[in-house]
């Protein structure tokens, strides 16, 4: 059992102002895997003061020195890859094999790519527009608030670019999966990050999160989480007009065109929905299929679903670990019941947990799902795929765009140009063509209720700068 007693503030481990704790439990067994302190507004105030105090000097640090620190953090993360992966598996349920190659390694990449993006900006030099020199300056103190589904990835996607840009950070990780954030603080300390540049305060969204969002000395909020919390944060941040990036929910459509190779596309489409046990904001949870191919798609999907073995995180054959908590399981099973009661046809899976104890859910596929059904409209955040038939490509576009979200999407076709042409019609921040793996250097973010701003690589880094025109400093 891991016991964390202190927050990381101003380069030191500081005891919280009150003695409350958060219990972190393994969602498969209910076993206590860790305790972390639960912070207060006072703890946030200390962390913001430390971040503010460190800002001027970090912003003035030569960018190549900042890059060198990021590279050391990247190496530190790589050295502790398996330890971090196993921690994450124990707190939010991802299979260990998946955590090691995805959760932990994505964090390594985020630090690497933020550093490389900063180098690219330096190599390009500053822009001149006529008589004006355009310069970038770090935004200031960044409040980073993150969810549990890819805990370390989400943290690193914010903290790495913020620090590369010269900002200082106060991080509040998810109370469901906070443990990897504490290891990251250790890695920062070992990498020689100056005191106060990165600060960690844990606790409840309504207490610690809201104090960060409303704090007058915080210049920007970078939030990833539910649309509901994102809206609340936008409201709370409005009076002080903080800069905001919001990475929120999704209900993304994966469209099979009629020339797709079903034997490849359908099993891959299941993976695009079920990876991380369906707990991915960019999960492609609606599969749009030409009506003429529906029966064949259902057959391949039912067969492929059998390979999504449910089990404990440490079992190498597990592809679906437990979902993150019993609450999460209850919510997902409720959605499955709503699919049945609203008339969708169950192809495989269902609302009976495959293992009696623990937060397990079977790989579930519905067919004949229509746009008015709850499972077609709301983010389920579990291993539940809705197959929706369409008659024409125009109808497929309409169905895909008929939700208020716009985070991701997919297109499958034997002809890549045709897939790309179709993808241009989807009102969403990313479209995955023929199952291409995620590129962590390309921009990621949402249209509509999926959010504001972009993360990853160069575009993600740009969010952490103010742009200043020096009139008369140009040609
Ligand atoms: P959540 O919104 O409940 O919590 C996310 C974080 O926000 C947590 O740290 C929480 O404590 C904090 N928080 C909650 N209410 C707050 C408030 N009023 N003020 C300040 N902070 C607050 O989300 P979750 O359940 O942890 O994660 C699942 C959700 O995150 C899903 O909706 C998913 O789609 C979304 N998500 C989006 C992306 C993306 O990049 N777009 C990535 C991962 C997850």
Image (cartoon, rainbow, N blue to C red):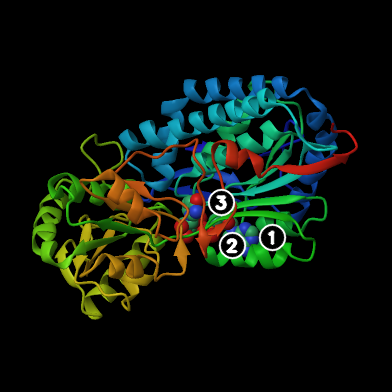
- Separation of disc 3 and disc 1 at Cα? 18 Å
- Which of the 4 quarters of the picture holds residue 4? top right
Left or right: 380 as drawn, with respect to 222: left
Give the label, 3 or 1, closer to the camera: 1
Q: Quadrant of the C terminus?
A: top right
Q: Residue at x 72, y 50 (%)?
A: 220
Q: Position of residue 354 (x, y in %)?
A: 20, 56
Give the number of the disc on residue 230: 2
Judge: label 2 CB < 8 Å from ligand 1.
yes
- Residue highlighted by disc 3: 22
- Which of the 4 quarters of the picture holds residue 398? bottom left
Q: Secondary structure at mark 3?
A: strand
- Residue highlighted by disc 1: 210
Is residue 360 visible from the viewing direction of this image?
yes
Is residue 18 visible from the viewing direction of this image?
no
Q: Position of residue 100 (x, y in %)?
A: 37, 31
Q: Position of residue 366 (x, y in %)?
A: 20, 66
Judge: label 1 CB < 8 Å from ligand 1.
yes
Q: Position of residue 245 (x, y in %)?
A: 63, 53
Q: Nearer the viewer, residue 316 or 141?
A: 141
Left or right: 114 as drawn, with respect to 201: left
């Amino acid at each position: 059992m891991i016991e964390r007693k202190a927050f990381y503030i101003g380069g030191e481990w500081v005891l919280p102002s009150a003695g409350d704790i958060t219990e972190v439990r393994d969602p498969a067994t209910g076993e206590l895997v860790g305790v972390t302190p639960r912070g207060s507004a006072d703890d946030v105030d200390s962390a913001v003061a430390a971040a503010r105090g460190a800002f001027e000097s970090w912003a003035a640090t030569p960018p190549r020195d900042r890059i060198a620190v990021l590279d050391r953090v990247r190496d530190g993360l790589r050295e502790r890859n398996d330890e971090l992966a196993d921690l994450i598996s124990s707190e939010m349920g991802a299979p260990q094999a998946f955590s090691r190659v995805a959760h932990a390694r994505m964090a390594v990449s985020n630090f690497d790519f933020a550093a490389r993006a900063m180098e690219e900006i330096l190599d390009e030099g500053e822009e001149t527009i006529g008589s004006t020199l355009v310069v970038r300056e770090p935004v200031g103190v960044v409040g980073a608030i993150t969810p549990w589904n890819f805990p370390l990835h989400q943290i690193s996607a914010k903290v790495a670019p913020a620090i590369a840009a010269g900002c200082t950070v106060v991080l509040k990780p998810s109370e469901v999966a906070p443990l990897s954030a504490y290891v990251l603080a250790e890695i920062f300390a070992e990498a020689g990050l100056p005191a106060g540049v990165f600060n960690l305060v844990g606790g409840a969204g309504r207490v610690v999160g809201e104090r960060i969002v409303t704090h007058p000395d915080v210049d920007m909020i970078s939030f990833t989480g539910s649309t509901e919390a994102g809206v609340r944060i936008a409201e709370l941040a409005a009076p002080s007009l903080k800069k905001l990036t919001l990475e929120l929910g999704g209900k993304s459509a994966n469209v099979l065109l009629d020339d797709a190779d079903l034997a490849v596309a359908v099993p891959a489409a299941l993976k695009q929905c079920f990876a991380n046990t369906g707990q991915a904001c960019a999960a492609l949870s609606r599969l749009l299929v030409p009506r003429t191919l529906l029966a064949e798609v259902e057959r391949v999907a039912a067969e492929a679903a059998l390979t999504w073995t449910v089990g404990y995180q440490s079992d190498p054959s597990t592809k679906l670990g437990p979902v993150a908590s019993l609450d999460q399981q209850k919510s997902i099973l409720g959605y499955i019941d709503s699919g049945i009661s609203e008339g969708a046809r169950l192809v495989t899976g269902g609302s009976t947990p495959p293992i009696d104890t623990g937060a397990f859910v079977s790989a579930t596929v519905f067919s004949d799902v229509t746009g008015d059904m709850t499972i077609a409209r709301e983010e389920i955040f579990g291993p539940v795929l809705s197959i929706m038939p369409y008659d024409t490509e125009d109808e497929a576009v309409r169905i895909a765009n008929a939700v208020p979200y716009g985070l991701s999407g997919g297109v499958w076709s034997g002809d890549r140009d045709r897939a790309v042409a179709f993808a241009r019609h989807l009102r969403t921040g990313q479209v995955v063509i023929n199952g291409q793996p995620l590129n962590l250097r390309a921009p990621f973010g949402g249209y509509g209720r999926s959010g504001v701003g972009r993360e990853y690589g160069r575009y993600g880094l740009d969010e952490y700068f103010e742009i200043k025109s020096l009139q008369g400093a140009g040609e």
